Image (cartoon, rainbow, N blue to C red):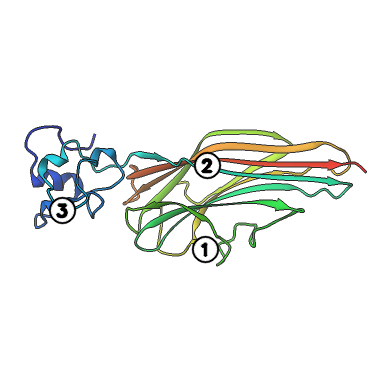
Amino acid sequence: MPGLQSSGAISLQDIEDEFGGDHAIPISDYIRGGTYVKQGSTANADIPTSTSNIQFSDFYNAANVYETIGLAQGSTVEANQETEGENGPPALGWVYFFVWSDGTDTFVSAFTFVGSGGAVTSTHPSGSASAGSYDGTLIYTVNLGGQYYCKVTLSNSWVDAQDGSLSVHNDFASYTQITTGTEASAKYYKIVAYANADPFNTTTQWMDATGRLTFDFNSDGGTNADLSIYWDYQARAYSDTQGD
Protein backbone atom coordinates (compact mmCIF):
# COMPACT_ATOMS: atom_id res chain seq x y z
CA MET A 1 0.00 0.00 0.00
CA PRO A 2 1.64 3.28 -1.05
CA GLY A 3 1.92 6.23 1.23
CA LEU A 4 4.08 7.90 3.84
CA GLN A 5 3.92 7.17 7.55
CA SER A 6 1.44 8.80 9.95
CA SER A 7 3.98 9.85 12.58
CA GLY A 8 7.69 10.23 13.26
CA ALA A 9 10.38 11.88 11.20
CA ILE A 10 9.84 12.23 7.45
CA SER A 11 12.89 13.02 5.34
CA LEU A 12 13.14 14.67 1.96
CA GLN A 13 14.33 11.31 0.67
CA ASP A 14 11.11 9.70 1.94
CA ILE A 15 9.07 12.29 0.04
CA GLU A 16 11.18 11.82 -3.06
CA ASP A 17 10.80 8.05 -2.90
CA GLU A 18 7.01 8.43 -2.77
CA PHE A 19 6.47 11.23 -5.29
CA GLY A 20 9.56 11.20 -7.51
CA GLY A 21 12.15 13.89 -8.15
CA ASP A 22 15.88 14.11 -7.62
CA HIS A 23 18.24 15.04 -4.82
CA ALA A 24 18.70 18.60 -6.07
CA ILE A 25 15.12 19.77 -5.52
CA PRO A 26 13.84 21.33 -2.26
CA ILE A 27 10.70 20.49 -0.31
CA SER A 28 9.04 23.56 -1.84
CA ASP A 29 8.87 21.65 -5.14
CA TYR A 30 6.41 19.22 -3.55
CA ILE A 31 3.44 21.57 -3.30
CA ARG A 32 0.04 19.97 -3.94
CA GLY A 33 -1.03 20.32 -7.54
CA GLY A 34 2.55 20.89 -8.69
CA THR A 35 4.86 18.68 -10.70
CA TYR A 36 5.13 15.87 -8.19
CA VAL A 37 2.20 15.83 -5.76
CA LYS A 38 -1.16 15.04 -7.29
CA GLN A 39 -4.14 17.21 -6.51
CA GLY A 40 -6.91 14.66 -6.52
CA SER A 41 -6.40 12.53 -3.42
CA THR A 42 -7.69 13.54 0.01
CA ALA A 43 -4.57 11.86 1.39
CA ASN A 44 -2.67 14.93 0.19
CA ALA A 45 -5.12 17.52 1.52
CA ASP A 46 -2.70 18.79 4.21
CA ILE A 47 0.03 19.60 1.71
CA PRO A 48 -0.07 23.31 0.81
CA THR A 49 -0.66 24.46 -2.75
CA SER A 50 1.94 27.21 -2.35
CA THR A 51 5.49 27.24 -1.02
CA SER A 52 4.66 29.34 2.04
CA ASN A 53 4.90 27.44 5.34
CA ILE A 54 5.29 24.01 3.74
CA GLN A 55 6.81 21.55 6.22
CA PHE A 56 7.62 17.87 6.53
CA SER A 57 4.71 17.15 8.88
CA ASP A 58 2.32 18.15 6.06
CA PHE A 59 3.23 14.85 4.39
CA TYR A 60 1.90 12.45 7.05
CA ASN A 61 -0.19 9.78 5.25
CA ALA A 62 0.41 11.49 1.89
CA ALA A 63 0.44 9.16 -1.10
CA ASN A 64 1.23 9.22 -4.77
CA VAL A 65 -2.25 8.00 -5.73
CA TYR A 66 -5.61 9.33 -6.81
CA GLU A 67 -8.94 8.35 -5.42
CA THR A 68 -11.80 7.29 -7.63
CA ILE A 69 -13.83 10.37 -8.54
CA GLY A 70 -17.54 10.09 -9.33
CA LEU A 71 -18.91 12.67 -11.75
CA ALA A 72 -22.23 13.86 -10.38
CA GLN A 73 -23.86 14.51 -13.72
CA GLY A 74 -24.94 11.68 -15.95
CA SER A 75 -25.46 11.46 -19.67
CA THR A 76 -28.96 10.64 -20.86
CA VAL A 77 -30.15 10.46 -24.44
CA GLU A 78 -33.66 9.44 -25.47
CA ALA A 79 -34.80 8.86 -29.06
CA ASN A 80 -38.54 8.63 -29.74
CA GLN A 81 -40.04 7.98 -33.17
CA GLU A 82 -43.82 7.72 -33.63
CA THR A 83 -44.94 7.57 -37.26
CA GLU A 84 -48.27 6.86 -38.88
CA GLY A 85 -48.30 4.56 -41.87
CA GLU A 86 -45.75 2.19 -43.34
CA ASN A 87 -42.59 4.32 -43.28
CA GLY A 88 -41.77 4.49 -39.62
CA PRO A 89 -38.08 5.39 -39.14
CA PRO A 90 -35.77 3.70 -36.64
CA ALA A 91 -35.01 5.41 -33.35
CA LEU A 92 -31.39 5.75 -32.28
CA GLY A 93 -29.91 7.13 -29.09
CA TRP A 94 -26.13 7.57 -29.13
CA VAL A 95 -23.66 8.60 -26.44
CA TYR A 96 -20.03 9.39 -27.24
CA PHE A 97 -17.20 9.81 -24.72
CA PHE A 98 -13.97 11.28 -26.10
CA VAL A 99 -10.47 11.35 -24.56
CA TRP A 100 -7.78 13.58 -26.04
CA SER A 101 -4.77 15.69 -25.08
CA ASP A 102 -3.50 19.13 -26.01
CA GLY A 103 0.01 18.17 -24.92
CA THR A 104 -0.39 19.76 -21.49
CA ASP A 105 -3.54 18.20 -20.08
CA THR A 106 -5.80 15.31 -20.98
CA PHE A 107 -9.54 15.85 -21.40
CA VAL A 108 -12.73 13.79 -21.30
CA SER A 109 -15.86 15.04 -23.05
CA ALA A 110 -19.31 13.65 -23.74
CA PHE A 111 -21.59 14.12 -26.74
CA THR A 112 -25.12 12.76 -27.17
CA PHE A 113 -27.54 12.82 -30.08
CA VAL A 114 -30.71 11.11 -31.24
CA GLY A 115 -32.21 9.96 -34.49
CA SER A 116 -34.53 12.37 -36.30
CA GLY A 117 -36.90 11.33 -39.06
CA GLY A 118 -34.95 8.15 -39.64
CA ALA A 119 -31.58 9.91 -39.93
CA VAL A 120 -29.05 10.66 -37.21
CA THR A 121 -27.88 14.19 -36.68
CA SER A 122 -24.13 13.44 -36.70
CA THR A 123 -22.15 14.35 -39.80
CA HIS A 124 -20.33 11.04 -39.46
CA PRO A 125 -22.83 8.57 -37.94
CA SER A 126 -20.43 5.66 -38.38
CA GLY A 127 -18.11 7.16 -35.77
CA SER A 128 -15.53 8.42 -38.24
CA ALA A 129 -12.62 10.37 -36.77
CA SER A 130 -12.83 12.90 -39.60
CA ALA A 131 -12.11 16.47 -38.55
CA GLY A 132 -15.19 18.27 -37.29
CA SER A 133 -17.23 15.16 -36.57
CA TYR A 134 -16.91 15.55 -32.78
CA ASP A 135 -18.12 18.44 -30.66
CA GLY A 136 -18.37 17.17 -27.11
CA THR A 137 -19.06 18.96 -23.84
CA LEU A 138 -16.01 18.93 -21.60
CA ILE A 139 -16.75 16.92 -18.46
CA TYR A 140 -13.31 16.48 -16.90
CA THR A 141 -9.75 17.76 -17.18
CA VAL A 142 -7.16 15.21 -16.14
CA ASN A 143 -4.41 17.34 -14.61
CA LEU A 144 -1.78 14.64 -14.87
CA GLY A 145 0.05 15.91 -17.91
CA GLY A 146 -0.30 15.63 -21.62
CA GLN A 147 0.74 12.09 -22.48
CA TYR A 148 -1.15 9.67 -20.26
CA TYR A 149 -2.65 6.23 -20.83
CA CYS A 150 -6.36 5.48 -20.56
CA LYS A 151 -8.48 2.36 -20.16
CA VAL A 152 -12.30 2.37 -20.13
CA THR A 153 -14.45 -0.38 -18.64
CA LEU A 154 -18.23 -0.83 -18.39
CA SER A 155 -19.93 -2.05 -15.22
CA ASN A 156 -23.37 -1.99 -13.56
CA SER A 157 -24.76 -2.51 -17.02
CA TRP A 158 -28.50 -3.08 -17.45
CA VAL A 159 -30.37 -3.61 -20.70
CA ASP A 160 -34.09 -4.02 -21.37
CA ALA A 161 -35.08 -4.48 -24.99
CA GLN A 162 -38.04 -5.47 -27.12
CA ASP A 163 -36.57 -6.10 -30.56
CA GLY A 164 -34.02 -3.36 -29.98
CA SER A 165 -30.26 -3.57 -29.74
CA LEU A 166 -27.29 -2.12 -27.87
CA SER A 167 -23.86 -1.74 -29.41
CA VAL A 168 -20.62 -0.24 -28.11
CA HIS A 169 -17.30 0.85 -29.55
CA ASN A 170 -14.31 1.14 -27.22
CA ASP A 171 -10.87 2.37 -28.25
CA PHE A 172 -9.67 1.87 -24.66
CA ALA A 173 -10.28 -1.83 -23.94
CA SER A 174 -6.69 -1.88 -22.62
CA TYR A 175 -4.42 0.97 -21.58
CA THR A 176 -3.92 3.15 -24.65
CA GLN A 177 -1.64 6.17 -24.81
CA ILE A 178 -3.39 9.48 -25.39
CA THR A 179 -1.18 11.31 -27.84
CA THR A 180 -1.37 15.01 -28.56
CA GLY A 181 -4.18 15.92 -30.93
CA THR A 182 -7.63 17.46 -31.05
CA GLU A 183 -11.08 16.34 -30.02
CA ALA A 184 -11.87 15.79 -33.69
CA SER A 185 -9.24 13.05 -33.84
CA ALA A 186 -9.90 11.70 -30.35
CA LYS A 187 -10.28 8.08 -29.42
CA TYR A 188 -13.72 7.37 -28.05
CA TYR A 189 -16.20 5.11 -26.31
CA LYS A 190 -19.59 4.97 -28.08
CA ILE A 191 -22.88 3.51 -26.86
CA VAL A 192 -25.74 3.08 -29.33
CA ALA A 193 -29.34 2.17 -28.46
CA TYR A 194 -31.46 1.25 -31.50
CA ALA A 195 -35.08 0.27 -32.09
CA ASN A 196 -37.16 0.03 -35.26
CA ALA A 197 -40.88 -0.81 -35.18
CA ASP A 198 -42.43 -3.10 -37.77
CA PRO A 199 -44.10 -0.72 -40.24
CA PHE A 200 -46.90 -3.21 -40.95
CA ASN A 201 -48.35 -3.40 -37.45
CA THR A 202 -48.59 -1.33 -34.30
CA THR A 203 -45.91 -3.15 -32.35
CA THR A 204 -43.87 -0.84 -30.18
CA GLN A 205 -40.17 -1.56 -29.93
CA TRP A 206 -37.66 -0.16 -27.48
CA MET A 207 -34.19 -0.37 -26.04
CA ASP A 208 -33.23 0.89 -22.59
CA ALA A 209 -29.61 0.76 -21.43
CA THR A 210 -27.88 2.09 -18.34
CA GLY A 211 -24.43 1.53 -16.91
CA ARG A 212 -21.28 3.02 -15.47
CA LEU A 213 -18.15 3.83 -17.43
CA THR A 214 -14.89 3.99 -15.50
CA PHE A 215 -11.95 5.86 -17.01
CA ASP A 216 -8.60 4.74 -15.57
CA PHE A 217 -5.53 6.87 -16.26
CA ASN A 218 -1.89 6.17 -15.61
CA SER A 219 1.47 7.51 -16.70
CA ASP A 220 3.21 4.37 -17.93
CA GLY A 221 0.66 2.00 -19.46
CA GLY A 222 0.99 -0.39 -16.53
CA THR A 223 -1.77 -2.01 -14.51
CA ASN A 224 -2.28 0.55 -11.72
CA ALA A 225 -4.36 3.68 -12.24
CA ASP A 226 -3.14 7.09 -11.07
CA LEU A 227 -6.68 8.40 -11.41
CA SER A 228 -10.07 6.76 -11.89
CA ILE A 229 -13.24 8.66 -12.73
CA TYR A 230 -16.64 7.16 -13.44
CA TRP A 231 -19.60 8.38 -15.41
CA ASP A 232 -23.14 6.94 -15.31
CA TYR A 233 -25.13 6.94 -18.52
CA GLN A 234 -28.56 6.11 -19.87
CA ALA A 235 -29.45 5.55 -23.53
CA ARG A 236 -32.99 4.84 -24.71
CA ALA A 237 -34.58 4.28 -28.13
CA TYR A 238 -38.34 4.00 -28.64
CA SER A 239 -40.03 3.32 -31.99
CA ASP A 240 -43.77 3.09 -32.55
CA THR A 241 -45.54 2.91 -35.91
CA GLN A 242 -49.25 3.71 -35.93
CA GLY A 243 -51.55 2.05 -38.44
CA ASP A 244 -53.41 4.19 -40.97
- Inter-mark Cα distance, 1 to 3: 39 Å
- Inter-mark Cα distance, 3 to 2: 37 Å
Q: Measuring from the top left, give residue 101's x and y in whole percent.
A: 41, 60
Left or right of residue 67: residue 169: right
Report which quarter residue 162 is drawn in: top right
Q: Measuring from the top left, give residue 109's x and y in whole percent.
A: 49, 53
Disc 1 versus disc 3: nearer the observer: 3
Q: Is residue 139 visible?
A: yes
Q: Are marks 1 and 2 in contact (CB under 8 Å)?
A: no
Name the element at disc 2.
loop
The residue to which callout 1 is attached is 184
Q: Is residue 175 visible?
A: no
Q: Residues within 10 Å of mark 1 (few under 14, many from 20)?
A: some
The residue to which callout 3 is attached is 51
Q: Measuring from the top left, give residue 48's x and y in whole percent.
A: 19, 47
- Residue at 47%, 46% in the rendered image: 173
Report which quarter residue 82 is drawn in: top right
Of 84 and 102, nearer the camera is 84
The residue to which callout 2 is attached is 74
Q: Could you tell which of marks 3 and 2 lies nearer the N-terminus?
A: 3
Q: Residues within 10 Å of mark 2 (few under 14, many from 20)?
A: few
Left or right of residue 191: residue 154: left
Quarter of the picture containing the N terminus is top left
- Residue at 54%, 37% in the rendered image: 211
